[in-house]
Image (cartoon, grey):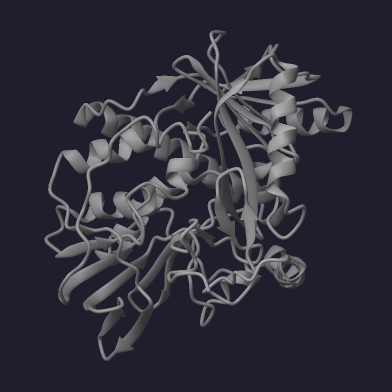
Amino acid sequence: MKNISIWKDSIDLKEYPKLNENKNVDVLIIGGGITGISTFYYLKKSGLKTILVEQNKIGLGITGSSTGKLSILQNDLIDKIRSSFNDETALKYINSQIDAINKIVKLILDLKIDCDLEKIPASLYTNNEFEIDRIKNLAAFLLKNNIRVEPSNLKIVKNKFAIKDDVSYVFNPLKFLNGILSKDDYEIYEKTSIIKIKREKNFYISYTDNYKIKSKFVVIASHYPYFLIPYFFPFKSALEKSYLSASTYNGQKLSLINYQKPFISIRTYKNYLIYLSNSHNISCKTCDYNHFQELLKKLEDIKLKPDYLWSNIDIITNDGMPYVGEIKKNLLIGTGYNTWGLTNGFLAGEILKDIILKNNNPYISLFAPKRFNLAQLKGYIGNICKNALGFLVGLKGKNNHYCSHMNCKLIFNKIEKTWDCPCHGSRFDINNNPISGPANKKSK
């Protein structure tokens, strides 16, 4: 059994150098996941000199730990958006996801990217009586707006009601990124952390340990923005950890997820079944070993044994909508995808490109990070409490490892052999090097 994601074991990614000199560019992209690579892809023909830096290796963060789904049946998220906003906004969000799926598929076909793309209807199910009417109501909403769904017959999980769509796909996300990068030359620097960003007149200076990058625009495409002011990101989002496995499997092709927490997400990949479960806020129930054991029990119930085990962390926004756009003049972010980072991350790349080039885009206002609503306000207090809880949870640990982001005490994940932060989700390898942010320096 391997304690890495199946995607990371499926491909040898191209290696890029570490930054070794000062740079003067038009656009600096920070983060080498699907948001950063998509933004770079969309800017490639703009004539703007663009570079991308990644503190670890391209694709090996959240993108390389995902389930690899492209779907519009996104658990209870659509209903959360309907509640936070209205039906019109929810429909715009659904159409954005359909748009993203269509553009990803078109790109794969146009560039002839070998990323194991398959069209498999996605199913949304429940095993709770009180959720049946909610799914039926969601189905009626979709059908009313000419989005086809129909009843689904699932056998691998116990369920009392399920629906499925006809627009969803699954693929290998790392092969997809690798395919984009292999079709053109991109100036990318790995093992390069940005430790500070400073505004000077009409440009930004971004600092690494030894070098400076001067740019008119900065796109922060890292999973979790590492600054607090002026955006106060910890108040506007929470972090959710999930546990995944890939097991040898020879049954029917599947793609499904249940309606409401605790989430179970399942899909097939070649002769494997990928199973996600035990999602929780990172500040609560922090013993990863126990969560992995519960996942193993669920696999045992369907007579499977894992070939791969790994975990992933997602950013959950207060109102269910991503944060994509400008937060200060020429400083942009793309994050907060509520576990649906592949569609939203790719979509963010086009939105960020259009903001930089001053093009019209129907989703700029929809995902605007400066938005404010009642759902945002309600989440503030809860997120402040969760951050405080994470700090307190860490204090109970017996180790003396501290996160370099905000000094939270780290918890050792003995399955994946990483040091994990219960406050803001930073992860470090066994040698204290940052694997994923917001931390961008070695742990203490």
Rendered residue at 48%/58% (across/down)? 335
Is 122 displayed left or right of 24 in the figure? right
Residue 346 position within the rendered picture, expressed as x and y whole percent measured from the top left = 38, 46
The reply to whether residue 426 is visible in this rendering is yes
Residue 11 position within the rendered picture, expressed as x and y whole percent measured from the top left = 31, 32
Residue 5 position within the rendered picture, expressed as x and y whole percent measured from the top left = 48, 36
Is 371 displayed left or right of 23 in the figure? right
**Picture layout, residue 139 above or below residue 230:** above
**Could you say which is closer to the camera, residue 114 or residue 166?**
114
Rendered residue at 70%/70% (across/down)? 387
Is 285 displayed left or right of 421 in the figure? right
**Could you say which is closer to the camera, residue 186 or residue 5?**
5
The reply to whether residue 259 is visible in this rendering is no
Rendered residue at 48%/64% (across/down)? 432
Q: In which quarter of the image is residue 375?
A: bottom right
Residue 65 position within the rendered picture, expressed as x and y whole percent measured from the top left = 48, 41
Rendered residue at 66%/52% (across/down)? 86
Q: Quadrant of residue 150?
A: top right
**Could you say which is closer to the camera, residue 238 or residue 360?**
238
Is 272 displayed left or right of 330 in the figure? right
List the single residue furthest toward the bottom: 201
Q: In which quarter of the image is residue 262?
A: top right
